[in-house]
């Protein structure tokens, strides 16, 4: 096995930045912080633009296999309003089969945060592959991915949504009449950042649903931070946390 860690010799031969005083370091950090904040604002603006993307109706029926049998695309929402469906390559012709999924897809699965926070924002994350449910169940148990819903593709879903040859996240929205719309798609290096609550919410049509966001008229919003909770206490109002948030926002002038 090749050692991917840099050797002492490599470290010694690096052209390292200058070593400066704490005051000089602070000045350099503050200069870079300006650019960091510009990037954050740019990222927020991009998410706002996603929320204004046109939608396309999903008219064709798609089937999947789950632990309890055959499911439709609508079933994968689990009753929530939004669905982020990742095409993971755990297929018979993929390197690693049947012990492992694709190395990159596996690394992505390791990054997935606790799903209860996504659920609180009416959003479901699920994975889909061509592997059988028996093999998927064994893989999830072996790799510690039990909480990720993972379905077997049994129709043309992967072909129709651009994920038959490469991984990617498709985002869907379920309206008040249970009609399904495709709202966004991200793949290639865009998948690198996925895994956190915020990275998923920022590609959905409703976004983070917080009061500071730039969203179209009528989109749901709640006060920032106050919807947060410990992942095992959602549904139990925490008045003390609301007091903490109110005090912090006054102090920070938010």
Image (tube, rainbow, N blue to C red):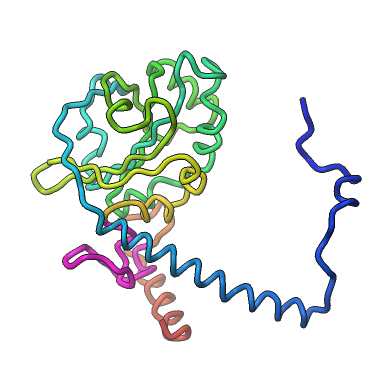
Counting from the top left corner in percent of width and height, residue 41 is at 44, 70
Magenta region, mostly helix, strand or loop? loop
Q: Quadrant of the N terminus?
A: top right
Residue shown at 21% from the left, 65% from the top? 216
Is 103 above or below relative to 49? Answer: above
Q: Is residue 5 magenta?
A: no
Residue shown at 31% from the left, 71% from the top? 223
Q: Residue furthest left?
A: 177
In front of the other: 19 or 63: 19
The image quarter containing residue 132 is top left
In front of the other: 155 or 83: 155
In front of the other: 21 or 38: 38
Counting from the top left corner in percent of width and height, residue 196 is at 47, 51
Is 102 above or below relative to 249? Answer: above
Residue shown at 42% from the left, 56% from the top? 198
Counting from the top left corner in percent of width and height, residue 222 is at 28, 67
92 sits to left or right of 54: right
Is 96 above or below relative to 216? Answer: above
Q: Which residues are magenta?
A: 206-227
The image quarter containing residue 168 is top left
Residue shown at 30% from the left, 69% from the top? 214
227 sits to left or right of 10: left
Is 142 above or below relative to 104? Answer: above
98 sits to left or right of 182: right
Q: Is residue 217 magenta?
A: yes
Counting from the top left corner in percent of width and height, residue 230 is at 43, 56
Q: Quadrant of the C terminus?
A: bottom left
């Amino acid at each position: 096995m090749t050692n991917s860690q840099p050797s002492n010799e490599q470290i010694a031969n690096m052209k390292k930045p200058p070593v400066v005083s704490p005051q000089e370091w602070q000045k350099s950090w503050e200069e870079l912080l300006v650019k960091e904040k510009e990037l954050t604002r740019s990222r927020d603006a991009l998410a706002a633009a996603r929320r204004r993307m046109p939608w396309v109706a999903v008219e064709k029926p798609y089937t999947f296999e789950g632990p309890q049998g055959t499911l439709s695309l609508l079933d994968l929402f689990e009753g929530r309003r939004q669905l982020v469906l990742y095409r993971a390559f755990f297929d018979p012709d993929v390197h690693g089969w049947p012990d492992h999924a694709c190395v990159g897809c596996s690394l992505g699965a390791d990054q997935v945060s606790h799903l209860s926070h996504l659920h609180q924002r009416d959003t479901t994350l699920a994975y889909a592959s061509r592997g059988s449910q028996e093999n998927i169940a064994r893989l999830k148990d072996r790799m510690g991915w039990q909480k990720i819903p993972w379905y077997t593709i049994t129709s043309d879903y992967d072909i129709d949504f651009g994920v038959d040859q490469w991984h990617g996240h498709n985002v869907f929205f379920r309206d008040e009449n249970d009609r399904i719309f495709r709202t966004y798609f991200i793949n290639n290096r865009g998948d690198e950042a996925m895994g956190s609550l915020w990275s998923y919410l920022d590609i959905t049509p409703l976004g983070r649903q917080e009061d500071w966001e730039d969203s179209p008229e009528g989109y749901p919003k709640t006060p920032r931070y106050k919807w947060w909770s410990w992942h095992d206490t959602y549904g139990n109002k925490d008045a003390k946390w609301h007091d903490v948030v109110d005090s912090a926002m006054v102090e920070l002038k938010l």
